[in-house]
Amino acid sequence: MKVELIESVDEFIAATKLFRAVDPLRTNVIGSVSLAVSEGDRSYDDYRWWVVRDDDSQVVGIAMRTSPFNMNIAPMAKDAARALGAASSLRRRRPGVSFQDIVDALIEDTSRRRARVQARRVSATSRPPL
């Protein structure tokens, strides 16, 4: 894995276009913010744009940090996330980070409870056969 800290927001947008297109919903914040910065609609104290590439130079992960806000990470494989963590010097400062596995766990638990409630409703309204 190779992690690049990209200085130019326009270069970041171009490098991540295909990656963001594969999962536009979960990369929406990164895409929207980077486009707003590029177009001059948003300004922040500091910018950080990261791209994680595999051995074939394909983009396998992206992240950004627009200070004073927390780091925003797109869904990526664990090895890509580890490489990003090592390269982004998170050890010096621990920003708040959104992790997809936490969101997935929340959704999974919510779905499970919803399924149990529906199962209870069905069993409560079901009548035994005559």
Image (cartoon, helix red, strand yellow):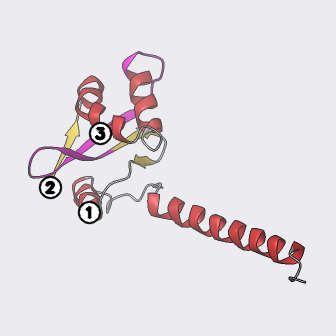
Measured along the vertical axis of the image, is residue 31 above or below residue 52?
above
Question: Residue 107: x, y in percent?
Answer: 59, 61
Q: Is mark 3 on a helix, strand or loop?
A: helix
> Which residue, given by chain and number where applicable, does mark 3 sit on?
19
Q: Where is residue 55 in the image (x, y as percent from the top left)?
A: 9, 52
| 1 or 3: mark nearer the eye | 3
> For the residue marked with disc 1, what is the amino acid?
Arg
Q: Nearer the viewer, residue 38 or 61?
A: 61
Image point 22% across, 59% down: which residue?
83
Nearer-N-terminus badge (2/1)? 2
Query: Along the horizontal axis of the image, is 74 left or right of 116?
Result: left
Residue at mark 2: 1
**24 is within the stretch colored magenta:** no
Residue 67: image quadrant is: top left
Q: Check disc 3 and give the amino acid type.
A: Phe
Mark 3 vs mark 2: in front:
3
Q: Give whichever of discs 3 and 2 has the lower sequence position.
A: 2
The location of residue 127, given as percent across then percent down, is 89, 78
Q: Is mark 1 on a helix, strand or loop?
A: helix
* Mark 2: amino acid: Met
Q: Do the residues labelled 2 and 1 touch (CB within 8 Å)?
A: yes
Q: Nearer the viewer, residue 111 or 1?
A: 111
Circle 1 residue: 82
Query: Would residue 33 be found to the left or right of residue 1 on screen?
Result: right
Separation (CA) of disc 3 from disc 2: 16 Å
